Image (spheres, rainbow, N blue to C red):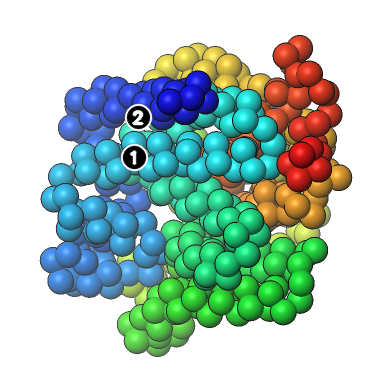
Amino acid sequence: MSGFKRAVFFFSALTLLTRLVFIAHFSHNPANILDVDGYVGIARSLLSGQGYALEPGVLTLERSPGFPLWIAFLFLVFGGNPLVVLLGNAVLNVVTGLLLAWLALRLFTRRCALIVLAVWSVYPFAVYYGGWNYLETFLLFLFTALLAAIYKWRESRNCLWAGGCGILAALAGLVNPAALPWIGVIPLWFFIREERSRAWRAFWLYSLLGVAVYAPWPIRNQIAFGKPVLTNIHGGLNLYQALIVSPDDLGTPQQTRDFDADSYYQQIMLVMQQRRYIEANEMLLRGSLARIKARPFAYLSSCAYRVVKLWRLYPYQRAYPYHYRIIFWISLLSDGWIIPLALLGLWGARRRWRELFPLYSAVVLWTLAYALIYAVMRYRMPVMPVMILFAAAALDDFLPWSRSPGARWVSPAGRR
């Protein structure tokens, strides 16, 4: 076994170990294994024949189906213990690290791949969120797998990889609709520096398989609620909440007071409690548009604020499971250097934008999606693998061990 393969094995094992240690620590108290956002409950309802429901027999439109279906699959195969989801997260983290290393090998250097694996193996927020039933671990795996499939299509010349891209893209959209803008522009890359007939074959295969995977969700909504809703109503709810609460008050007790003081919001909550989801969605849209129209510059200002909030180097002081000072220093010692170096890497590789279009568009469109609606730092997790990749490339290029500064920004084909 070569030194490179031994290093890959070591860092993959370290990735698994850090996740398992945290899961063992965090899940030691059963109260910590929470059904975050109701996904586990929906999965159990599906397996028990109660339908896609937060409550048995009461169909819901509050959550997209991708993550509950993944949990249901894990429960079906490995049993219904909530720890199964967390252990699945640990395995997904290992696979994500290997996919990242593969991307680094194809796009940058072997040393960059090792840096990526080393960083990912101990990246604290991947470790932390992998110990919860949040959807981010599954989604960042899908994002990374989609990126790997995109570049595999370009490398292999086999259009079946484009079909795989369409399936992964649809699954990502079913996990979180915020991914839809990005997966919608991915086909544009098929036409960049590619022969037209091949690009069109990839486009149609990507689109047809993507639609085939995604279509059952709006069809189900048409049958259940009388309207083919493409996403869920949670995004609209978050947008209206962001419009009635000052950005500085989000996540504080003042947020609850602002909700209680808004009579229109209370009407929406009443309609949602009665499971009149289509009516609630229309109310959210009307209310949000009216507030944006009344104060357009305030809305644009809040969008800019959400961009900054999404990419802050450390979180606001709020109520956390751990002492804030611990979280503050962990943030500065991880994202505090990863994000600035990633921005440097994004700038350094700008001349390769055609080749790296899927990576650039992922970061830009993901940021834009949450700038327009609602942002917390956790929401950046699905694109943090991309940021770690660019940070590793920058680190590889600028540290003294680099024998050929600037070579990382030349395509691999150009270096051979």
Residues under numbered marks 2 and 1 in contact, where contact means CB atoms less than 8 Å apart: yes
Q: Earlier in the sequence, mark 2 or mark 1?
A: 2
Q: Residue at x 73, y 41 (%)?
A: 412
Residue 150 at least partly seen: no
**In this orientation, which residue lies closer to the viewer: 72 or 263?**
72
Q: Position of residue 178 (x, y in %)?
A: 56, 59
Q: Position of residue 55 (x, y in %)?
A: 22, 63
- The quarter of the picture where residue 291 lies is bottom right
**In this orientation, which residue lies closer to the viewer: 132 or 247?**
132
Question: Along the horizontal axis of the image, is 363 left or right of 376?
Answer: right
Other residues around mark 2 within 10 Å, as few (<14) / some (14–19) / many (≥20): many
- The quarter of the picture where residue 377 lies is top right
| Amino acid carrying mark 1 in the image | Val
Q: Which mark is residue 91?
A: 1
Q: Residue at x 53, y 80 (%)?
A: 208
Mark 2 sits on what residue? 16
Q: Residue at x 22, y 72 (%)?
A: 51
- The quarter of the picture where residue 93 lies is top left
Question: Along the horizontal axis of the image, is 88 left or right of 316?
Answer: left
Q: Which mark is residue 212?
A: none
Q: Is residue 88 above or below residue 58?
A: above
Residue 51 at least partly seen: yes
Q: Position of residue 233 (x, y in %)?
A: 47, 66
